[in-house]
């Protein structure tokens, strides 16, 4: 049980709802602690195959709670550093989950909210969703979220949006690569369900390995070391029961029966 989250579990899919609708799911210390713990708990739960992150009420998330941020103005630099590390820890716990993650974005995804959407593997936005790195408007910067946002939109776009704080509509977010899809509001849940179904067809161990592969290879130029790294990763997987099942199922013309991973 989490004070600021609601979690629904259904057929291997955990939907995590941020639940501070009165402030558009702005995150305070409690929500940061709750979401960090929930990511770790769900990642360790063999019954969970896919994690969807959404927001109760009108928005996905309005980012850091500005009352909490303002209170930090009275705190020492060391205390603010500790706070920033907790926020970074939440994003990292989400981004480094072995399980596939989907951000289901409606309404505002501002500041840290855009960071949460960027830290998920996949982002689906309703047509009225609005993103922005609005921090400079408050005299602060998009700090902990920056690795995820820059990865999503690229350095060139980050120069613009980090400094202008312009709002990014859902369709533009899809053009930028920040959202994988922008869909009509009434189609948001169906699109998320469609992607969840596609994810459930894949082997869980292979999906975790695919995420680790992306993290390891990323933007590195092709070199002997990178080629060998990719070869090592697939050679380790080919010997697993999961790969045996996936390959056999295809050749037997039947769906693969994935088993919980040891
Ligand atoms: C390191 C990380 C940094 C960051 O993340 S910086 C924060 C970035 N966040 C933002 O830029 C969002 C700021 N909020 C807004 O722009 C607007 O709000 C919204 C677009 C989200 C919603 O606008 P509308 O529908 O007109 O509602 P409303 O009356 O402005 O908000 C309802 C209540 O929600 C509170 N609220 C909204 N965002 C935050 C927030 N980020 N932190 C704390 N409270 C927030 C408001 O103040 C208000 O409260 P009340 O009902 O008491 O007047």
Image (tube, rainbow, N blue to C red):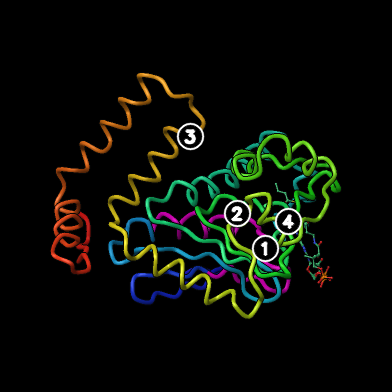
CA separation in Å, label 4 and label 2: 18 Å
Q: Judging from the image, what secondary structure is the residue with disc 3 in?
A: loop
CA separation in Å, label 3 and label 2: 20 Å
The residue located at (72%, 52%) in the rendering is 111
* Residue 145 higher or lower than 193, as above or below: above
**Of the two numbered discs 3 and 4 in the rendering, the one whose residue sits closer to the viewer:** 4
Mark found first going from the N terminus, 4 or 1: 1
Seen as rendered, the residue at the extreme top is 224
Q: Judging from the image, what secondary structure is the residue with disc 2 in?
A: helix
* Residue 224 higher or lower than 105, as above or below: above
Q: Is residue 69 left or right of residue 227?
A: right
Q: Residues within 10 Å of mark 1 (few under 14, many from 20)?
A: many
Mark found first going from the N terminus, 3 or 4: 4
* Residue 48 higher or lower than 37, as above or below: below
The residue located at (51%, 70%) in the rendering is 192
User: Residue under circle 2?
Assistant: 116
Q: Are marks 1 and 2 in contact (CB under 8 Å)?
A: yes
Whereabouts is ligand 1, in terms of quadrant? bottom right
Q: Main secondary structure of the magenta part?
A: helix
Mark found first going from the N terminus, 3 or 1: 1
- Find residue 19 and report its horizontal and vertical position in percent: 60, 71
CA separation in Å, label 1 and label 2: 8 Å
User: Residue under circle 1?
Assistant: 61
Q: Which residues are magenta?
A: 17-41
Q: Which label number is shown at residue 260?
A: none
- Find residue 136 and report its horizontal and vertical position in percent: 83, 43
User: Residue under circle 3?
Assistant: 218
User: Residue under circle 4?
Assistant: 172
**Of the two numbered discs 4 and 2 in the rendering, the one whose residue sits closer to the viewer:** 4
């Amino acid at each position: 049980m989490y004070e600021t989250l609601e979690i629904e579990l259904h057929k291997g899919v955990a939907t995590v709802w941020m639940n501070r609708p009165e402030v558009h799911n702005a995150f305070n210390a409690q929500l940061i602690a709750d979401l960090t713990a929930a990511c770790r708990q769900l990642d360790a739960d063999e019954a969970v195959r896919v994690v969807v992150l959404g927001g109760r009420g009108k928005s996905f998330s309005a980012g850091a709670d500005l009352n909490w941020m303002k209170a930090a103005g009275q705190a020492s630099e060391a205390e603010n550093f500790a706070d920033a590390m907790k926020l970074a820890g939440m994003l990292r716990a989400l981004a480094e989950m072995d399980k596939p993650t989907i951000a289901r974005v409606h309404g505002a995804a501002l500041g840290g909210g855009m960071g949460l959407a960027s830290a998920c593997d996949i982002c689906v936005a309703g047509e009225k969703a609005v993103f922005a790195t609005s921090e400079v408007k408050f005299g602060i910067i998009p700090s902990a979220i920056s690795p995820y946002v820059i990865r999503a939109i690229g350095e060139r776009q980050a120069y613009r949006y980090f400094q202008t704080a312009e709002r990014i509509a859902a369709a533009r977010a899809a053009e930028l690569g920040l959202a994988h899809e922008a869909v009509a509001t009434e189609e948001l849940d169906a699109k998320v369900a469609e992607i969840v179904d596609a994810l459930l067809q894949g082997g869980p161990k292979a999906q975790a390995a695919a995420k680790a592969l992306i993290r390891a290879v990323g933007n590195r130029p092709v070199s002997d070391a990178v080629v060998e790294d990719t070869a090592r990763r697939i050679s380790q997987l080919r010997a697993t029961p999961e790969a045996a099942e996936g390959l056999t199922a295809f050749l037997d013309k039947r769906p693969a029966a994935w088993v919980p991973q040891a």
